[in-house]
Image: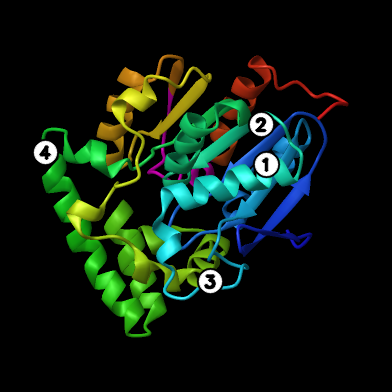
Amino acid sequence: MDNYQHIWLNNTTLTYIDQGHGAPVVLVHGSGPTDLRTWERQIEPFAAHFRVIAYSRRCHYPNPPAGDHADSASTRTHARDLAALITALQLGCVHLIGFSFGADIVLRLAVDRPDLVRTLAITEPPLRSWLAALPGGIDLLTQRAAAILPAKRAVQQGDLEHGARLFIDGMMGNGVFDQLPPSARQRIMDNARLIGAEPTEIDAMGAEDITRSEAATIQTPTLLLTGDASPPMFLLVSQELARYLPNVEQVQIRGASHLLHVMQPQAYNAVVLEFLTRHGGQRSSHV
């Protein structure tokens, strides 16, 4: 995946891949140590049927770093970037696929700019403000912050690999970092500096999340994916979100913990491609 293109939007450079033909599908990666390469097992299979755009969000590899990376944690900033990218590339109304924090971003865009969104396929949005309001949620957020703080300190002290291992294992379970494919570990290391900007103050988490009342306004057909081995915080939020989205389908992928598209790419791809095709995503000569 080295056919990168670059575009200057909202006073930052966004790097993207544009492959295939047909109805446009935009892939939005998660937070912290990841980038467009997380979709390496989706781009070609999806591009056989659609026009696929995968981009790295601001501050993420290979885009230039920006100051203290404060914007890397802003849902609204990334949603504005996404809207600007869709508009600049003249994509019209798109299928949006978001993973983790990327799912938070596409949900925000679906609320703010429904004219740009054809369908949503989202995996385990954190929606931390929602989690905080659920039974046991504050405890889970506190545990998450406690797990991430040592990772942040390690990164801030310059030990990126130790910080990356602490971050991934703290989020997904002990030993997960070392079980990831080498390409996934390399992506994490290329973005490890961003772990230092991860929010760990409870009152700052989820300040820009969509609200429950906003979720109830999203008429867009939505596929909500979870993993059967995912951390409880993600499963609780997904269950709650499904109660409010008016037009949602839920699918659980077996043998996966949060990183569904990396850990079980064949199952993930089959489910998402079927959903997109069923909701007006058939191959077309018109974009």
Which tag, 1 or 4, sits closer to the chain's start? 1
Q: Badge 3: how crowded within 10 Å, few (<14), some, or many (20+)?
A: some
Picture residue at 25% right of the left edge, 36% below the top: 130
Q: CA distance from mark 3 to mark 2?
A: 29 Å
User: Could you tell me residue 151's position as x and y percent?
Assistant: 29, 70
Taking depth in this image into account, of 17 and 77 the one nearest to the observer is 77
- Mark 4 lies on a secondary structure that is loop
- Mark 2 lies on a secondary structure that is strand
- The type of residue carrying mark 4 is Gly
Q: Badge 2: how crowded within 10 Å, few (<14), some, or many (20+)?
A: many
Q: Residue furthest right?
A: 285
Q: Pointer 1 and pointer 4: residues touching (CB < 8 Å)?
A: no
Q: Pointer 2 and pointer 1: residues touching (CB < 8 Å)?
A: yes
Give the residue pinned by disc 2.
94
Question: Residue 190, which numbered label?
Answer: 3
Q: CA distance from mark 1 to mark 4?
A: 38 Å
